Amino acid sequence: AFRWVLPALVLIDLLLAVAGVVRYPPLWQQRGAWRFVLEPACALLAYAVLLVIVQGRRGAEWAAARHLAWRYGLGTGLLEMLNVVLEDGAPELNGAWMTLGVMLVVFSAWGVAAWQATRGTGSVRMGIVAALMAAGICMLVAVGGGFALELFVLPPDPRGVAAWAEFQRSGWTDARAFAVANTLESGFTHLVAAPVVALVFGAGGAGLANCAARRPAV
């Protein structure tokens, strides 16, 4: 039933990114602007290919891993979206402690997905797969929400962007263009970093479940 949902999410994220760039053509006048557009596009296309491959696998173990990935991926994706909304719309409520807390909850949830998948299937590999898929779903939801918010609904004020140290070091002359590029770069960073983090937390969760299963009964 959900076979085409993930490719659809990838397409939505791509369209949001393209529309954000098309909406402000002066972006192309800035040095190296193409890189900020190409990076998230390539990452999203890689997600599409990998997720379609994973969803095509058959068997009870894969079905169980996908079920847990959807549960934890969608939940953590919505949590990440809420964090972005608070960060942009109510920064006074979203300090460093909240960002760190959300990150720990999200990463731990991916580990729990791996733990449950390993317990249910008896396979460490499927536990790690569940964590990786959960991270992928989370990022597709969160990046799409971030693109929609920061490119269209509540874009950063160029006057504020002009005061960013990153903008002043960049050599760019257009603060609004930099805000667009920064949003695209943030999406790319999240898409690339999430599988690495999921691999670490997934291996931890799956390893704990495997050790618990092998522990002799007292």
Image: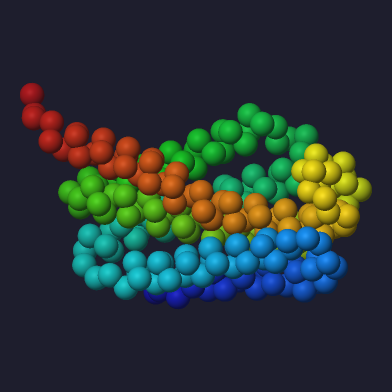
Task: Report the front residue among 12 and 183.
Answer: 183
In the displayed structure, 208 sits above or below 79; it is above
Tell me what residue is drawn at x 24 percent, y 70 percent: 58
| Residue 85 in the image: above or below residue 209 | below
**Residue ID at (28%, 63%):** 63
Q: x, y (%) of residue 70?
A: 42, 58
Q: Quadrant of the C terminus?
A: top left
Quadrant of residue 216 within the rendered picture: top left
Q: Residue furthest top?
A: 218
Residue nearer the viewer, 29 or 186: 29
Query: Residue at position x 83%, y 54% from top?
Result: 172
- Residue 147: % across, % down: 68, 60
Q: Quadrant of residue 205?
A: top left
* Image quarter of the N terminus: bottom left
The spot of residue 32 in percent (x, y) is 73, 61
Q: Nearer the viewer, residue 206 or 171?
A: 171
Say if residue 82 shows up in the picture: yes
Q: Left or right of 42: which side holds 205?
A: left
